[in-house]
Structure formats: C-alpha cells, structure tokens
Image (tube, rainbow, N blue to C red):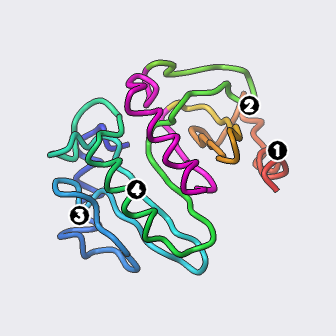
Amino acid sequence: DLEVEANTEYIRAMNRGANGLPYVVRKGPAGCEETTYSFDWNDVHFVILNVYYDGTKDNKSDGTIVPVLLNWLENDLKQNTKKRVLVFGHEPIYPFMDMDNGTVRHLNEALDKYPDNAQPFHRLLAKYHVTAYFSGHTHTASYANINGLWLINSGHLYGQEDRYNPERLFSVLA
C-alpha cells in the first residue's frame, strides 16, 4: 500500500539503490527505481508497478499510470521473452463486485478515476498478452477476464463473515 509513506519507505529499503532484490531484470523509471521493477523466475516475467508514481516521485497520493510509467512498462514488455507475464499494482484498473457479497468498493477511486491513463494501461496489457494484472486496495476479492486478460483483486483473505475459501477462486482460474 504505497499511498502510505512508511510503507513506501519499507519497499524502498528492501530494494535500496535498485540493487536490493535478486533477479531484477529492469529497474523502474527515474524517481521510482526502487519501487517499480521487473524480474524473471523460471518461465514467468513479473512486473511490480508503483501506481503512486507521478513521473518524478514515487509517493504521490492518487493511484494512476502516468505516461512515463506506461512507456517504461511498454519497453519492459517489448523486451520480455518469457511465456507468462504477471503484472502487480496496488489499485485495480476497474473495481469489480466482491465474489462473496457483491460489495463494490473504491469505484472511481482506483485507477478508473483517471480513465485517460487506465484505458491505455489496460490496452497495453492486452497488446502484450499479459496473463493477469493483480491488485488489492478495495478490501474485496474479485476476478474478471476481459479479452484474455485476468484482472484479479486479492483485496481480502477472509471473505464474507470469515467464510472465504481460496479454492472458490482457484477452481475458476484453473
């Protein structure tokens, strides 16, 4: 949750100087080298995006995909040679209904708040055949497949009244 400065500093410290994490393929653009990066593991390319990057600093308050970050991501995806690509960011592109109770949280308060940035981001993920975009932020659990791209929000682990069963989601994705 990089909208909180203490959390941002914790992530920066883990990857201090953009050299703290193993297997990093590409560090993020100037201003978020420590909080945006990609790495490969086996046949999967992982991309970690700091959606609170404003083009110069890595800790602005609203989540969005600014043009500098979108360009960095496209360059990263162009260079990828792995079979599967998973992208992670704190806020969902579009908040969907919770799979347990139908709650929709943060509608127009996630990446969808800035559609001129969210829509090109979504199109870029589809263009490069990204397998899934994972997010949190909403404190709901939801998933959708839009044109082959899985949008997975793992915003809670407990579900409605502590009845969450991970197999419910995993069986659909299998």
Earlier sequence position, callout 3 versus callout 2 = 3
Drawn side of residue 43 relative to residue 168, left or right: left
The C terminus, quarter of image: bottom right
Label annotation for residue 41:
none
* Residue where numbered disc 4 is placed: 74
Name the side, left or right, on which 61 lies relative to 170: left
The Cα atoms of the two marked residues, 3 and 2, are separated by: 35 Å
Q: Position of residue 96 (x, y in %)?
A: 63, 27
Does the magenta run of residues contain 48?
no
As helix, strand or loop, the secondary structure at mark 1 comes to helix
Give neighbour class at mark 2: few <14, some 14-19, many 20+ (Cα, 10 Å).
some
Name the residue: 56% across, 59% down.
Answer: 86
Look at the image and give the residue range highlighted in magenta: 109-137
Q: The disc labelled 2 sits on which kind of residue?
A: Met
State which quarter of the image contains the N terminus: top left
Q: Is residue 118 above or below residue 12?
A: above
What whole-number distance in Å separates the C-alpha atoms at marks 4 and 1?
A: 33 Å
Q: Amino acid at mark 3?
A: Ala
The reply to whether discs 3 and 2 touch (Cβ–Cβ < 8 Å) is: no
Q: Which mark is residue 99?
A: 2
Three-letter amino acid code of the residue under disc 1: Arg
Decide if residue 89 is on the left or right side of residue 54.
Answer: right
Q: Which residue, given by chain and number where applicable, does mark 3 sit on?
A: 13
Give whichever of 99, 50 is nearer the camera. Answer: 50
Q: Which residue is mark 1?
A: 168
Q: Position of residue 105 (x, y in %)?
A: 55, 21
Q: CA distance from mark 1 to mark 3?
A: 36 Å
